[in-house]
Image (cartoon, rainbow, N blue to C red):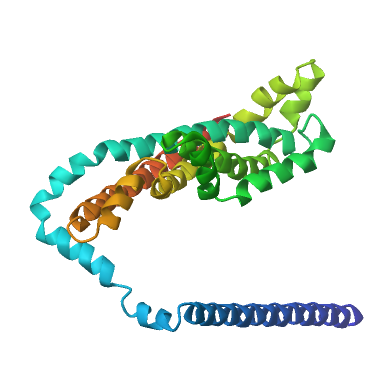
Amino acid sequence: MDKHSSGAQATAQLRGHYMAQLRKKRLLNMILLIVFIGLMAAGFRTAEERNAGGFLDGVRNIFDFPADVVGEAISRAHLLPGYLLKYLPSLIETINIAAASTLLGGLIGLFFSLLVTRGLAPVPWLVGPLRRVLDFLRAIPEIVVALVLIYLLGGGPVPAMIAIALHTVGALGKLFSEVNENASLKPVEGLESVGASWSKRMWLGVVPQVAPNYFSYALLRFEINIRASAILGFVGAGGIGYDLRNTMSWGQGKFDEAGAIFLLLFGTIVLVDQMSSLIRNRFTHGAKLSEVRV
């Protein structure tokens, strides 16, 4: 009877502790929601004041520009195939920028990830400083780096590729390091016992374990970089974004070409997303099957 009462008392205490934590979490969520709403309201008020009362008036016209683009594109739908062929080379340039920056940034990010993973790093005291380097690369927007490089190197795809690659190093370096932490250290210890160098331990003991995750994150980053390379075209970094800026700044009479560019970008992103999802699923599923067979 005493054991039963003590067990019931422990259960009641555990339930009370859980309910207290749940109430605390709900209260915190409510506070965060109130803060978010307050910040949004303050932001709208600031925008209204700085625009001399024109912000609320402009909100009513938010759909005017998309309506003009769609209307002009529909009225000149017979010219759409020609526009698609006209801007296809620019789209290919944008994809090339994204692919090159993803490959370059992914390789450098992989190397950095092995240097900042605790338990794998060859110089443990460098883990902290190198992590801050990755944080710095992620913190600076690509467009800021691209503007600086355009000032130094001139317009073109090279500044865009370097800017996106630097951001990719920071992003993939962080993601790859988290993946490395889940790798088993037994193969690494076995290679170390036979005198393998650090590079061979990483290449043969760590990378094969987490390669599917590397590949998945790299494909996801490739999708993001396609969008980034299109955006950088607005600041003169080449690609289809540059053509989109020109057609949109021209105004009426070029909106049909802008619509064609939007269609190219949308179709490309959807196609790349579907293909990368298919490749990731097959690659990961195949890796799991091989692990089961072993």
Nearer to the camera, 7 or 226: 226
> Does 38 sit above or below residue 255?
below
Q: Is residue 197 visible?
A: yes
Tell me what residue is drawn at x 24 percent, y 60 percent. Answer: 251
Q: Position of residue 289 (x, y in %)?
A: 51, 35
Does residue 26 appear left or right of residue 226 in this picture? right
Tell me what residue is drawn at x 67 percent, y 34 percent. Answer: 112
Pick the quarter of the image with the C terminus. Answer: top right
Q: Position of residue 237 (x, y in %)?
A: 42, 41
**Most extreme residue toward the left, as rendered?**
78
Q: Quadrant of residue 16?
A: bottom right
Q: Is residue 268 visible?
A: no
Nearer to the camera, 2 or 105: 105
Does residue 116 appear left or right of residue 280 in this picture? right
Q: Position of residue 89 (x, y in %)?
A: 27, 36
Does residue 163 appear left or right of residue 279 in this picture? right
